[in-house]
Amino acid sequence: MALSRGASAPDPDDDVRPLKPCLLRRNHSRDQHGVAASSLEELRSKACEILAIDKSLTPVTLVLAEDGTIVDDDDYFLCLPPNTKFVALAGNEKWTYNNSDGGTAWVSQESFDVDETDSGPGVKWKNVARQLKEDLSSIILLSEEDLQVLIDIPCSELAQELCQSCAAVQGLQNTLQQVLDQREEARQSKQLLELYLRALDKEGNILSNQEESKAALAEDAVDTGVGKETASGIALTSQILTALKERPAPELSFSSQDLELVSREDPQALAVALSWDIKKAEAVQQACTTELALRLQQMQSLHSLRNLSVRKNPLPEEQQSPKRARQDPE
């Protein structure tokens, strides 16, 4: 049992960690289970027990129910607010959109591709609008493409979808435009910094060393045949690879899900796929990691402010039971 394992190998840090209340469910289930855990590993263990996950399907991956972000770092788990909703993915399961989570623009990559090609942009902007209706702070996590989509939607249509007045929606679209402008300003600042650093590289004769390193990497890929195997095994979509290669400061244009995918990719595979040297690939990954951490920190701050506001002005309809099972209408 989980309790006996914890007793046989106590961790001094766990003794002082408070229990964090969380909500758990399976990928295609509406039944939520309230649990409390002091660490990510403890939450995984309880998820297997409470959700009756077969041991043959372990290890279990925990993702945020609202957007599908993979939670595999204990420090990040501790930074999440109480009553965060988690989805337990077993085996080869992939997170998918669920109406019970309030709506989101993020779905599994296969579903995302189908939405764009089969359903068209009309469905996509409504998915993004539902995400904002559930949590306005998710503006921080949207890609530049999603931000532009909501800005271009007629005010009356967006107001109807969000059940808000046109004046309120106009203010929201102005805010979306400000976020988009801020990212563009940050991109231009990074471009100026890159130009300055390139000038320093030329003066210090550093570019020659980089070219030698790049040539050696290309020669190794040709001799060993690693290049083709790595490139074919990369998990990033062609859309992400194109943005990485062509856009300045590409991390500013990605959604938080795309940022996480780039950050988790193997640097060697990324370098070969983009015909870059390993240092440039690692630098881009570090930029994506930093941008993701910044957005998550902003989300945490907004959630903290919202929770404080709710405690001061509680709304009866927002109060939830820790464990709630929804019945299927059918």
Image (cartoon, helix red, strand yellow):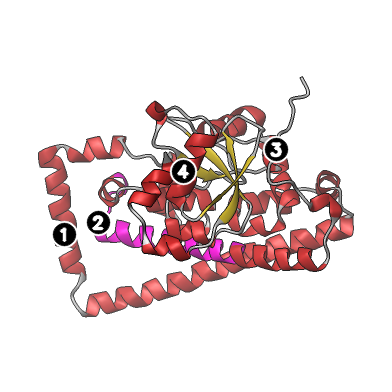
Residue 283 x/y as whole percent: 33, 62
Residue 248 visible (yes or no): no
**Looking at the picture, does residue 277 appear above or below residue 306?**
above
Q: Amino acid at mark 4?
A: Arg
71 lies left or right of 157: left
Q: Amino acid at mark 1?
A: Ser
> Most extreme residue toward the left, as rendered?
223
Disc assigned to residue 100? 3
Disc assigned to residue 278? 2
Q: Which residue is found at the position 51% from the left and 39% from the top?
A: 47
Say which residue label 1 marks.
213
| Nearest-to-viewer mark from 1 and 2 | 2
Q: Quadrant of residue 139?
A: bottom right
Disc assigned to residue 44? 4
Q: Within 10 Å of the Cα at label 4, are there few (<14), some (14-19), or many (20+) other Cα atoms?
A: some
**Looking at the picture, does residue 301 appear above or below residue 47?**
below
Numbered range of the magenta stretch: 273-299
| Nearest-to-viewer mark from 2 and 4 | 4
Q: Which residue is found at the position 49% from the left and 35% from the top?
A: 49
| Nearest-to-viewer mark from 4 and 1 | 4
Q: Quadrant of residue 178?
A: bottom right
Q: Are marks 4 and 1 in contact (CB under 8 Å)?
A: no
Q: Amino acid at mark 2?
A: Ile
First-in-chain label (4 vs 3): 4
Residue 232 x/y as whole percent: 30, 35
- For the residue labelled by badge 3, is the local secondary structure a helix, a strand or a loop? helix
CA–CA distance between discs 3 and 1?
A: 51 Å
Residue 78 x/y as whole percent: 50, 60
Work out whether residue 235 or residue 225 is closer to the camera in this orientation and state it.
235
Q: Amino acid at mark 3?
A: Ser
Q: Are marks 1 and 2 in contact (CB under 8 Å)?
A: yes
Q: Within 10 Å of the Cα at label 1, are there few (<14), some (14-19), or many (20+) other Cα atoms?
A: some
